[in-house]
Amino acid sequence: MTIKSVKQIHTFPDEIQSMMETFKDMVNYCIRIGISENISNLNKFSSLHYKDLSQFNIQSYYKLTAMSQAMGRLAQRKKDMKKGRIVKSPYISKPYLVSCYGFKITGMLLSFPMYHGDKFLVRLDSHTMSQLENAEPRSFVITPDSVSISVRKQVEQIIPENVIGIDRNLRNITISTPNQTVMYKTSKLLSIKENMSHVISSFKRFDVRKKKHFQKRLGNRRARRIQQHLHKISKDIISRAVQSKSMIVLEDIKCIRKLYRKGNGQGTKYRRRLNSWSFYELQRQIQYKAEWEGIPVGFIDPKRTSQLCPICGERLQEDRFHRRKLLCNNCKRSIDRDVVASMNISYKGWSRFCHPRGLLVEAVNGNLENFRPVILQVDGSKLVETRK
């Protein structure tokens, strides 16, 4: 069973805004009681304090959800404290409303209960309706400017016949498919981040409140632009995987930030550029989209993916005249280092997940004597979404 959320922009009237404020206060009230009495279990809390929520003028549907939200936050807080992590405040600062009871989707209308048994209707757009096809709505979340619907559907995982290896870099994303190698250019993301950093640093007003508001507004705009750019790339990758019945393999680079910490002998601009690299956002989008389509996703060790020849398995040498090229003295061929990495990731994934016999060199050596990679370069910002 696969679950995802569909978000739609929508502005709500003052009456619904007051319900959001009431729900926020109710969740914070439950959190205060849970902290004071050391309760993080929903059944225990509801049996002791459900009657105390009668002071809030809101439907009982939302009281059950508020207790669930509060106990979930306290349970996560307790886990973080046991593991020695930095514990954030569990209290909620922004108004919202969530429930899995009492709502209904009829045609293009979402209805959920208000005060005194009335119903509020939200008209769903065409994109939201397309995502709700063949899916079961489970819950909804509304904020002052959006509505999100959680849906789930039964997905049968495909049996992969091929492997797509993905190499994530600062200026491009390279994938190795069964037929060709595709390189998505992401240099535009660097320019977006650099331009935003210069604009934020040029803010000269001494009002801290105004400065924080300015930084937050530009930071959100930067995040939206980057997310939309990566959305187009991840959507194209998933469509290729569905067409070729391939599983997706990525490098496990979750600890790469440790290489760019302060004091490692690197410049400030270099560390800023590498620490703002959105490698995990692409991974997150690929994972949830692949899960929705039934495509398996695997991770391999990134060790020596850019050092071994994908044709013969020998160690590659750097080209003095072309810094992005790697030369194989055995094959007498020069290949782009990102293409080499994506091909080796694909071969590692094939030998580990689809054909788990022998080493990588044994699986590759001698099988690609006449291979010449066909490299398709794509500007990720110019990928066009087609709608029916």
Image (cartoon, grey):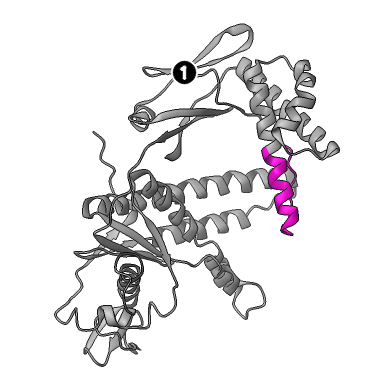
Is residue 93 something one can see in this rendering? no
Q: Is residue 42 left or right of residue 358?
A: right
Three-letter code for the amino acid on which mark 1 is drawn? Lys
Q: Residue furthest bottom?
A: 329
Residue at 78 percent across and 29 percent down: it is 29
Q: Which residues are magenta?
A: 72-92
Q: Quadrant of the N terminus?
A: top left
In the image, is residue 264 above or below residue 349? Answer: below
Nearest the eye: 170 or 49:
49
Q: Quadrant of residue 266?
A: bottom right
Q: Is residue 58 left or right of residue 118?
A: right
Q: Quadrant of the C terminus?
A: top left
Judge whether residue 90 is colored magenta: yes
> Does dot 1 land on a helix, a strand or a loop?
strand
Residue 284 coordinates in the image, percent (x, y):
46, 52
User: Which residue corresponds to mark 1?
Assistant: 104
Q: Is residue 122 left or right of residue 215?
A: left
Residue 184 coordinates in the image, percent (x, y):
32, 61
Is residue 125 something one can see in this rendering? yes
Residue at 75 percent across and 44 percent down: it is 89
Q: Is residue 132 left or right of residue 28?
A: left
